[in-house]
Amino acid sequence: MALNSKTGPVKDLGVGTEGNIFDRLLSLLPNWYSDGTPILSALLQGIAYTYSFIYSLIRYATYQTRISTATGGWLDMIAYDYYGNSLVRGPVQSDDSFRREILMGLFQEKATRKAINNVVFQLTGSTPRIFEPLRVPDTGAYGAPNFGYGLAGGYGSDLLPYQAFIKVKALPRVGIPFIAGYGSSVGAYRTPSQEEYFPIGSLVSQVTDAQIYSALDKTKPVATILWVNTPN
């Protein structure tokens, strides 16, 4: 609790905090009081608490007006305003992850090979392998420096127009907090740091296949087909 500046220093925790507002109110009063003013201090403390609460609400409301600072349900409302039901937060998706998806859709380059590469990289942190059967730089050609049987290039085909094959690298998996690795010297059953049998399916990646497919679908050119291989 903040104290009258005559009886002790007021701890200022920052603009808008209870101590800060108490100190501001006290500084506005004339210096007519003795060193001990418990009734005045209690009165000002109550006012400071109320003003601090109001200030925190105003600051919270301000944060929700920008994509870069919005949180929780407000971020979901922003996504709905821009995308309707075409962009929905995943079951355990964090605000930061969802925010990246929203911004990606607003400013992302579209309908180019570079755009496909960028959207996968931004989601996964790794560069995908993109192969277009009708693109010579991908398939290579006899006598060309970018072709080597079993080493570089690939079989092209004019039966697959406007199509591409995309291979996404394995995504990092999220560990289980407070669970020691199998055989770890610090692990023991039922005591910290404990060891447990845990389903491998519970080690999910932070980015799902569905998110990758959705991002690619929004980025690819119209009337094209993308065949995507993900390791999840």
Image (tube, helix red, strand yellow):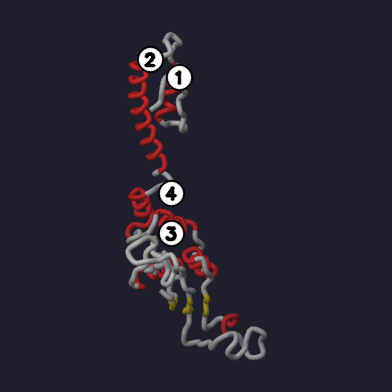
The kind of secondary structure element at disc 1 is loop
Residue sitting nearer the eye, 23 or 178: 178
Residue type (three-letter) at the residue carrying disc 3: Glu
> Residue 131 in the image: x percent, y percent?
52, 79
Circle 4 is placed at which residue position? Answer: 67
Residue sitting nearer the eye, 175 or 134: 175
Figure quadrant of residue 49: top left
Task: Tell me which label, 3 or 4, sits earlier in the chain.
Answer: 4
Circle 3 is placed at which residue position? Answer: 101
Q: Nearer the viewer, mark 1 or mark 4?
A: 1
Contact check, label 4 and label 2, Cβ < 8 Å: no
Disc number for residue 37 = 2
Figure quadrant of residue 152: bottom right
The kind of secondary structure element at disc 2 is loop
Q: Nearer the viewer, mark 1 or mark 3?
A: 1
Q: Crowding at label 3, few (<14), some or many (≥20) Cα neighbours within 10 Å? A: many
Task: Tell me which label, 1 or 3, sits earlier in the chain.
Answer: 1
Q: Is residue 13 above or below residue 177?
A: above
